[in-house]
């Protein structure tokens, strides 16, 4: 078995969750001994596992079909998580949905990160079989490290008595960036650091203004940072606060959980079945509730859920994801074999 992992616009999307998903797929396949290539000109593969949606991605699917290859589409995106992102996203979202349905329907199988995103796709009327498989997490990479924590604290010049709340995400309204800033105003003695970046020309003026000008002194937009500083932040912060309104999974949550960090999220459908309020994280529904929870968690007045949160990440390790992907690959190839065997049987019994 050989898999072609295709990822259009790798440099552009490298800073996004989809970019990290590709890295996880490479690691996952290596862990279970599946041969794969990233060479789009390759023709000696069995399955095209495609992650992106551009014009070249569309062409890759058509090319694979002509070559008689099996196609698995990784459905990272939905109409719902396209809204409230880029300029004009809400107006374009119905067209995006039609385009995604058209692309996804060309596959032999769909993979999407959560039961929630699977239910959305089924609601679109897509008839292709769909499997729910997490994007996974590299537990070793996010294992807490004093050295990494020190690098984070030195980079941001953090004093020993400072309270730090972090978030990681693109500059999208959907990510809850407005709420993050509004809540920070209630806690002038805490530092709120937002990791991540989106080109300013692509986001609405309201978000652009918040990032560049209209935020209190205790809010810092750190931009895109990776490696030891970010990984140190996950472990050393007092709280990971992720007020997103819509996700297909939220890889950054898995990163925080793997870092044994205390996690606070918005109570939204995507977390049903794997995140549980007051058990492996805390959940809120309004800024008033978030403010109460932030105070209680940062000041250690509420029980922490770090240990149970880490178990959630452990269940979604890259090694585990590799085995789940392998099952889907084998299933798709077996379907093809059954069709061939059935055709031969029919021919021989004429």
Image (tube, rainbow, N blue to C red):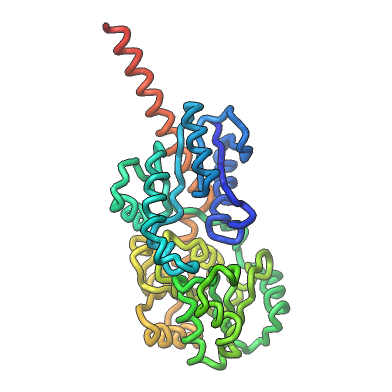
Residue 95 appears in view: yes
The quadrant the C terminus occupies is top left
Q: Residue furthest left?
A: 350
Position above or below: 291 against 36: below
Decide if residue 294 is on the left or right side of residue 98.
Answer: right
Q: Position of residue 16 (x, y in %)?
A: 56, 60
Residue 196 appears in view: no
Q: Nearer the viewer, residue 130 or 147?
A: 130
Decide if residue 331 is on the left or right side of residue 137.
Answer: left
Q: How many marks?
A: 0
Position above or below: 15 against 108: below
Which of the 4 quarters of the picture holds residue 11? bottom right
Q: Nearer the viewer, residue 227 or 277?
A: 227
Which of the 4 quarters of the picture holds residue 32? top right
Q: Residue at x 40, y 57 (%)?
A: 78
Which of the 4 quarters of the picture holds residue 110? top left
Q: Residue at x 61, y 78 (%)?
A: 221
Position above or below: 238 against 161: above
Q: Position of residue 156 (x, y in %)?
A: 69, 80
Q: Residue at x 60, y 62 (%)?
A: 142
Decide if residue 252 is on the left or right side of residue 342.
Answer: right
Q: Position of residue 119 (x, y in %)?
A: 31, 54
Q: Residue at x 33, y 55 (%)?
A: 120
Q: Position of residue 234 (x, y in %)?
A: 58, 71
């Amino acid at each position: 078995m050989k898999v072609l992992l295709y990822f259009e616009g790798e440099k552009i999307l490298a800073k996004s969750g989809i970019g990290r998903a590709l890295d996880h797929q490479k690691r996952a396949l290596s862990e279970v001994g599946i041969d794969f290539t990233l060479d789009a000109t390759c023709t000696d593969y069995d399955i095209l596992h495609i992650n992106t949606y551009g014009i070249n991605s569309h062409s890759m699917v058509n090319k694979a079909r002509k070559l008689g290859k099996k196609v698995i589409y990784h459905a990272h995106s939905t109409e719902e998580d396209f809204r409230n992102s880029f300029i004009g996203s809400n107006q374009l979202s119905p067209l995006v949905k039609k385009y995604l349905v058209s692309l996804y329907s060309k596959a032999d199988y769909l993979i999407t990160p959560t039961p929630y995103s699977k239910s959305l796709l089924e609601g679109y009327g897509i008839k292709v079989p769909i499997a729910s498989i997490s994007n996974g997490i590299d537990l070793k990479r996010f294992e807490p490290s004093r050295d990494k924590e020190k690098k984070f604290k030195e980079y941001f010049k953090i004093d020993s008595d400072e309270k730090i709340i972090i978030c990681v995400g693109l500059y999208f309204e959907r990510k809850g960036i407005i709420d993050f800033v509004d809540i920070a105003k209630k806690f002038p003695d805490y530092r709120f650091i937002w990791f991540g970046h989106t080109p300013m020309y692509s986001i609405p003026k309201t978000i652009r203004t918040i990032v560049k000008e209209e935020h209190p002194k205790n809010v810092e937009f750190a931009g895109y940072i990776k490696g030891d500083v970010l990984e140190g932040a996950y472990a050393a912060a007092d709280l990971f606060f992720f007020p997103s309104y819509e996700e297909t999974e939220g890889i950054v949550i898995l990163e925080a959980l793997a870092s044994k960090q205390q996690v606070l999220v918005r109570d939204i459908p995507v977390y049903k079945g794997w995140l549980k309020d007051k058990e492996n994280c805390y959940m809120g529904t309004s800024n008033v509730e978030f403010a109460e929870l932030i105070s209680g968690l940062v000041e250690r007045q509420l029980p922490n859920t770090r240990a149970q949160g880490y178990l959630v990440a452990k269940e979604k390790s890259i090694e585990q994801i590799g085995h789940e992907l392998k099952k889907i690959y084998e299933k798709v190839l077996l379907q093809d074999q059954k069709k061939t065997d059935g055709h031969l049987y029919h021919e021989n019994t004429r």
